[in-house]
């Protein structure tokens, strides 16, 4: 059984997402300084992550029945697609870890790139579906 949260809990929970997103956005805009060695992605990726968290916080606050959630869902999954595509195309192989033990390093790197790329295209498909739901008549 799913338990509904109270209005106060809803505001706190959604506010935490928005706050985290704002912090990422400020780091990505270089307003809040972060140690250079702790940043492993371009600043636009960090800003995009901030927008994703902010969108999630707004979705939580609006509730599941709000038709505007389709816009925020599209923002979230298109943002994830952009990040996944960036990792699959421009990600540095030295930052990839794990892999299958019987495969060589080059094959494991190719596998990581293929997985990130295919998941990015899946996110694009989900984003298109979210936009389709937005424009569908009730």
Image (tube, rainbow, N blue to C red):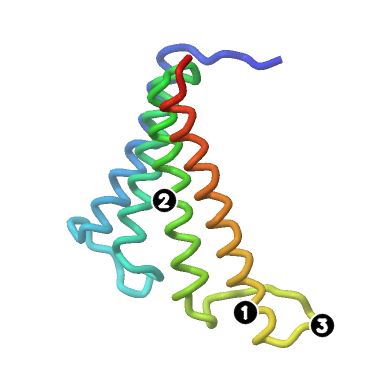
Left or right? Give the position of 106 relative to 131. right
Kindly indicate the quadrant of the structure image that contains residue 62: top left
In the drawing, does residue 2 fall left or right of residue 76? right
Callout 2 touching callout 1 (CB < 8 Å): no
Q: Is residue 65 above or below residue 29?
A: above
Crowd rating for badge 1 (residues with CA inside 10 Å; few <14, some 14–19, many 20+): many
Residue contact between numbered discs 2 and 3, judged by CB atoms under 8 Å: no
Q: Dot 3 lies on which element? A: loop
* Residue 59 % position (x, y): 42, 28
Going by the picture, which residue comes out furthest to the right?
102
Return the x and y of residue 56 as percentages of the image width and height: 42, 35
Quarter of the image where one finds residue 45: bottom left
Residue 88 x/y as whole percent? 52, 70
Which residue corresponds to mark 3?
A: 102
- Nearest the eye: 119 or 3: 119
- Between discs 2 and 3, the one toward the N terminus: 2
What residue does disc 1 label?
A: 109
Q: Residue at x 48, y 68 (%)?
A: 87
Residue 97 point in image, percent of width and height: 62, 74
Residue, disc 2: 79
Q: Is residue 54 left or right of residue 32?
A: right
Q: CA distance from mark 2 to mark 3?
A: 34 Å
């Amino acid at each position: 059984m799913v338990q509904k949260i109270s209005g106060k809990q809803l505001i706190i929970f959604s506010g935490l997402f928005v706050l985290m997103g704002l912090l990422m956005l400020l780091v990505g805009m270089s307003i809040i300084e972060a140690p250079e060695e702790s940043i492993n992605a371009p600043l636009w990726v960090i800003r995009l992550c901030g927008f994703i968290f902010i969108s999630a916080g707004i979705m939580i606050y609006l509730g599941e029945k709000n038709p505007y959630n389709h816009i925020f869902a599209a923002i979230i999954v298109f943002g994830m697609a952009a990040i996944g595509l960036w990792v699959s195309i421009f990600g540095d192989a030295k930052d990839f870890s794990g892999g299958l033990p019987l495969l060589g390093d080059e094959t494991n790197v190719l596998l990581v790139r293929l997985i990130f790329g295919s998941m990015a295209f899946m996110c694009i498909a989900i984003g298109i579906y979210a936009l389709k739901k937005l424009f569908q008549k009730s």
